[in-house]
Image (spheres, rainbow, N blue to C red):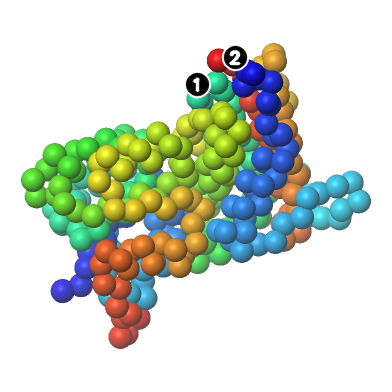
Amino acid sequence: MTHAANKPDLCRIGERAFTEVLDVLLSLPVTVRNSASHSTRSGVIDQITSRVFLSGPHLSGSVHVQFPQAFVAHAVRLLAGLDGTKGDVNAVQDDAAGELANMVAGRVAAQLAADGYACTLGTPSVFRGAELPVETQPGADRGRTDLICEGHCLALELRCHYANP
Amino acid sequence: MTPKILSIDDSKTIRLVLARLFRPFACEWREAANGEEGLTIATQETPDLIILDYNMPVMDGITMLRKLREDAALKRTPVIMLTAESGLECLATVARLGVRDYVTKPFREEELLAKVGRIISLIPRTNP
C-alpha cells in the first residue's frame, strides 16, 4: 500500500491541532464554526495570517492560520501580560501570530507523522490584511477549519501534496 | 547563589512568557533571539540552564547545541529543548547531543517548571 492510499483527514488534523494550541497555551474554549454561529467577523483588513511550510520525504505542504488583530492582542495580554495594542503593536502582534501558527503547525506535523507522513517545519511568515490564499498546487489536498474563540472567528487551512514513496 | 537561566528563542512572545513564568523564583534571567547570540551570552555568563528553541534564524538550536558541546567550559551545561518540532529525527538528534529534557510547544507551565526544577533549585523569591 502506498502512502497516497492513506491520505490523512486534513480537516480533523487541523481542528485538533488548533484546538489543542488554544487550550494548552491560552486556556481558551473553542467551538467549531458553522453557518448558524454568531460571532464578531472582522474585515480582511483586520486580519493577520501566518504561514508555515511543511516538508518531508512523502509530503510538502503548508499551514495557514488567520486571526483577527483583536484576538492576537488578547492573546498577547494573556501570554505575556502586555497590552498588545500599545508600543510597537505590529511587531508584537506579528511575533505572537507567527508563534501561534508555529505551534499549530507543530501539532499538525505530529499528527501527519502519526499517519505516516513525517515532516519538519519552516519558519513562520506573517501577512496582514490578506484573505487565506485560495491558489493551490495541482494534486494538493486542502482542509479548512473555522473556529470561534472568545467571539472571534479564526481560520486554519492545511494544504498537502503527497508524493508516492 | 541564584541559578542563571538563559532562554534562546526567536519569538519575543515566548521569551516574555518564560520570563514571566520564572519571575516568582530566585534566578537570574538572560535572553537571546538566536543560537549565535545565545552562544555569546552563554560564553560570557556560563548559565546553569539553557532553554533552547529548535528553529531559529541566524543559527538554529541544533547548530548552537553542537557548538556548546565542543566548548570545554560549556559542554556540560544542561539544556532543555522547547520547540514546536516533535519529529523522531529531531528527538534523536537532540538526544545524541545530550539534552536533559524536551518540551513541546504548546506547553503547560507546570510541566516546564517541573522539568526545570529537576535540574536547578527553583526557590520562590522572598520579595517577588
Position in image of residue A64 (x %, y %): 63, 35
Q: Residue furthest left?
A: B72
The vertical placement of A32 against A158, above or below, is: below
Q: Are marks 1 and 2 in contact (CB under 8 Å)?
A: no
Mark 1: which secondary structure?
Answer: loop
Q: Residue furthest bottom?
A: B126
Q: Is residue A49 left or right of residue A146?
A: left
Quickly name the residue at label 2. Answer: A164
Q: Residue at x 36, y 71 (%)?
A: B23
Q: Nearer the viewer, residue A46 or A151?
A: A151
Q: Earlier in the sequence, mark 1 or mark 2?
A: 1
Query: Which of the chains bears the disc numbered 1?
Result: A
Position in image of residue B34 (x %, y %): 31, 42
Q: Nearer the viewer, residue A127 or A18?
A: A18
Query: As shown in the figure, which amino acid type bears the numbered disc 1?
Result: Pro
Position in image of residue A23 (x %, y %): 62, 59
The part of the image, by quadrant, that contains residue B122 is bottom left
Quickly name the residue at label 1. Answer: A57
Q: Nearer the viewer, residue A114 or A163?
A: A114
Q: Residue at x 70, y 15 (%)?
A: A139
Label number found at residue A119: none
Q: Residue furthest front?
A: A1
Q: From the image, which quarter does the N terminus of chain B lie in?
A: bottom left
Label 2 neighbourhood size at 10 Å, few (<14), some (14-19), many (20+)?
few
The vertical placement of A153 against B112, above or below, is: above
Label 1 neighbourhood size at 10 Å, few (<14), some (14-19), many (20+)?
few
Q: Residue at x 39, y 37 (%)?
A: B90
Query: Is residue B125 visible to the viewer in this orientation of the structure?
Result: yes
Position in image of residue A81 (x %, y %): 50, 66
